[in-house]
Image (spheres, helix red, strand yellow):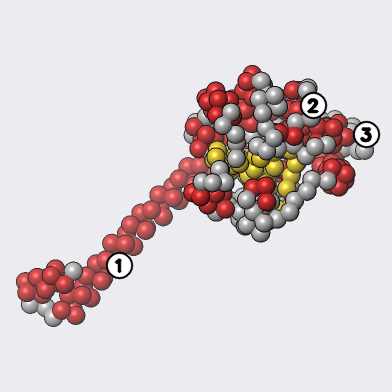
Amino acid sequence: MIFLTTKLERRSSLPLNEVMQFLSRFYSVTMFSRWSSSHHSQENDSLQHESKVKELRAALGPLAGRSLKYCTDACLRRYLEARNWHLEKSKKMLEETLKWRLTYKLEEIRWDEVAIEGETGKVYRANFHDRNGRTVLILRPGKQNTTSLDNQLRHLVYMIENAILNLPEGQQQMVWLIDFTGWSLSTSVPIKSARDTINVLQNHYPERLAMAFLFNPPRIFEAFWKIVKYFLDAKTFQKVKFVHPKNKESVEVMRSYFDEENLPREFGGKAILEYNHEDFSKQMVQDDTKSATLWGFDDKHQCIGNEKSGPEVAPEPLCIAPPAS
């Protein structure tokens, strides 16, 4: 820098301080120009995305009832993002989700119907969030206690819906902590069921998963994973992180997402977290009441009013809080 300024000073016969001022102004203008270009590019992307959202809404046609509530702008953005902002692919994906939700009748599932699946705490919503304030689901596949694959999936879907219902304002994604303590091939689900479950999560909950941490999986899991990973799309695959207690790098990655004081000891943290099925059940019943009130159900699980004009779908947390920008 000194050599350059000295050379400029000799050529222009300007004092060094004036040369430095010139270079400073030149640098400032250059940096502002780059920032301005980047800022305008971001604005253009934002405008294009908003335009795509409007196009998708128009392509879907008239919506009513729970379909209308479900298809918020934020919801449409998630489906567009999942399909790289391709209108037709996003439309097809969303329409298939609406049909699936209608068939599955997600809004009618209540805790008492799936409570037996949760007796061991194999899937439950944690009482803490990650550093970004996102809802955390804890999964413990080693605690498997039933054999009905359909009921297991129904329970998992119920817990995902509950996690979404309880997302803090401005958040649209959740984090999964998966504890492999006690896991074995005898407690694992068949490959076909694993594939079906992954398809449900990827096709009907796009952009809902922020990160999934697989904590201390046994060596035998590697054989299972080698098959299952091919069912994951590229985006989902990148969100799956293996964490081994003896691997400091993987542990640090997980801790970058969680406060050590909140993280349970089972995941390398300092908090003591014990699953109490009775207490958790009370919490879920309260959430069922909240969901029923929002969606116009009475305590007999019957819908108030005629909603035949559109598919019935499960609660969208954005009905509770404003859409995230």
Using the numbered discs, state the Cα–Cα distance from disc 3 to disc 2 in whole angstroms: 27 Å
Q: Give the residue number, with chain letter if any, for mark 1.
A: 28
Please tell me how crowded label 3 is: few (under 14), some (14-19), or many (20+) other residues with Cα within 10 Å: few
Residue identifier under label 3: 300
Q: Residue at x 60, y 40 (%)?
A: 216
Residue 261 visible from this viewpoint: yes
Q: For residue 62, which quarter of the picture?
A: top right
Identify the residue at the far right of this view: 300
What element does badge 3 sit on? Answer: loop
In the depicted structure, whether residue 92 falls above or below residue 275: above
Q: Position of residue 162 (x, y in %)?
A: 75, 41
Q: Earlier in the sequence, mark 3 or mark 1?
A: 1
Q: Position of residue 219 (x, y in %)?
A: 56, 32
Q: Are marks 3 and 1 in contact (CB under 8 Å)?
A: no
Q: Residue at x 37, y 58 (%)?
A: 36
Q: What residue sits right under mark 2 in the picture? A: 146
Q: Nearer the viewer, residue 135 or 100?
A: 135
- The residue carrying pointer 1 sits among few (fewer than 14), some (14 to 19) or many (20 or more) residues within 10 Å by Cα, namely few
Q: Is residue 76 left or right of residue 67?
A: left
Coordinates of residue 272 in the picture (x, y in percent):
73, 54
Res 89 visible: no
